[in-house]
Image (spheres, rainbow, N blue to C red):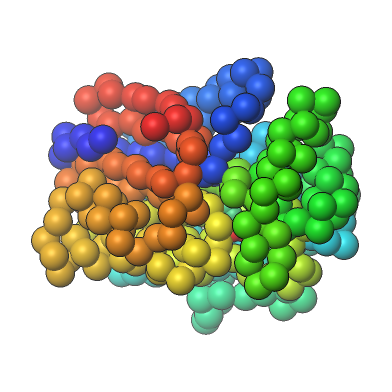
Amino acid sequence: MERNMGGWAIAVHGGAGVDPNLPQQRQEEAKQLLTRCLNLGIDALRSNLSAVDVVELVVRELETDPVFNSGRGSALTAKGTVEMESSIMDGLGRRCGAVSGLTTVKNPVSLARLVMERSPHSYLAFAGAEDFARQQGVEVVDNEYFITEENVGMLKLAKEANTIMFDYRIPEAGGLETCSAVVESPILMNGLPISVYAPETVGCVVVDSQGRCAAATSTGGLMNKMSGRIGDSPLIGAGTYACNLCGVSCTGEGEAIIRGTLAREVAAVMEYKELGLQEAVNFVIRERLDEGKAGLIAVSNKGEVAWGFNTTGMFRGCATEDGFMEVGIWD
Ligand SMILES: NC(=O)C[C@H](N)C(=O)O
């Protein structure tokens, strides 16, 4: 799908790889949150906030709500702790900031923005990033704040199955059944079984009415990941990218997104193959991504919005200045 209205455009995602048996209630909950976040972004764009301000604002909202896998509600490490990561990129001047290994920062995307604006670096991680957060006076909370009962249940299941979970479902009776079905036919990666589903990382891409593009992505990573594991979300060019042409945010199996440098590839094929935004998204998903692994959202400086995925579904929503708005999960 593609819209080309020449004004502002916004897209949000709440993760790719959705379980086809996801309870209806959970689907509705996710769609409501995406709609609320889109509206927040739309109001901000109408008030003339810049693209980078809008992506930060929207991702903060998604981090604060526990529905998706970022900030509160983040996936847990094998140790049962939360290690969050995020990045933000302003297409104007291609400025960027990224953070990993955060354990107490309430809104990782805002720390990524501070790395971009108030540090001489692009990427800070673990203890150094936490020190920087304190130095900057951002809101910090106990690690417990990020841990939800639901995720504790999911980690238990992942551990029992010795699986690094890409799934993110409610550990109720139905959830358990679906989950064991996943585990019965695992995909092996480096000798470890991995389910085919992806958890619900969040991201937002925006082009404002002046044609400035920005992108931001935030996540807790994968359920039962090794402590210290870094995925695609904080990696500029892999999970997040923005330039004067477009803004892109990815979601799915981080290792596959990193191998494909997906976000940057969208910009590269637009630039060097002179493809339109949706064509570029389709090309990258088809040519640079292993089957069933990921999805992405994108905007262009012309006010186009596009998305694509090769997983079962992707939580996403988009809107353009002419009043078009769509929120969906499946193809
Ligand atoms: N659902 C996700 O998008 C997970 C994220 N890409 C990661 O691998 O950390």
Residue 236 visible to the viewer: no
Image location of residue 323, percent across then percent down: 27, 22
Picture quadrant where residue 6 is located: top left
Identify the residue at image location x=71%, y=39%. Answer: 181
Asked whether 291 or 49 is in front, the reply is 291
Residue found at x 64% / y 39%: 68
Q: Residue at x 28, y 31 (%)?
A: 320
Instruction: Please state, as top left, top right, bottom left or bottom right, where the N terminus lies in the image.
Output: top left
Left or right: 1 in relation to 110: left
Residue placed furthest toward the left: 274
Horizontal relation, residue 40 to residue 188: left or right = left
- The extreme bottom residue here reads 120
Percent across and percent down for residue 292 are 48, 50
Residue 291: name its quadrant: bottom left
Name above or below for residue 249 compared with residue 132.
above
Residue 288 in sight in this render:
yes
Q: Is residue 57 above or below residue 41?
A: below
Q: Give the quadrant of residue 101.
A: bottom right
Quadrant holding ligand 1?
bottom right
Q: Is residue 1 above or below residue 326?
A: below
Residue shown at 25% from the left, 56% from the top: 283
Image side of residue 7 versus residue 73, left or right: left
| 313 horizontally vs 157: left or right | left
Looking at the rendering, in which quadrant would you find the C terminus?
top left
Q: Height in image: 37 above or below 303? A: above
Residue 161 is situated, as x and y percent measured from the top left of the image, at 82, 52
Provide residue 71's location: percent of width, then percent of height.
69, 48
Of residue 231 and residue 43, the one placed in the foreground of this image is: 231
The front one of 325 and 315 is 315
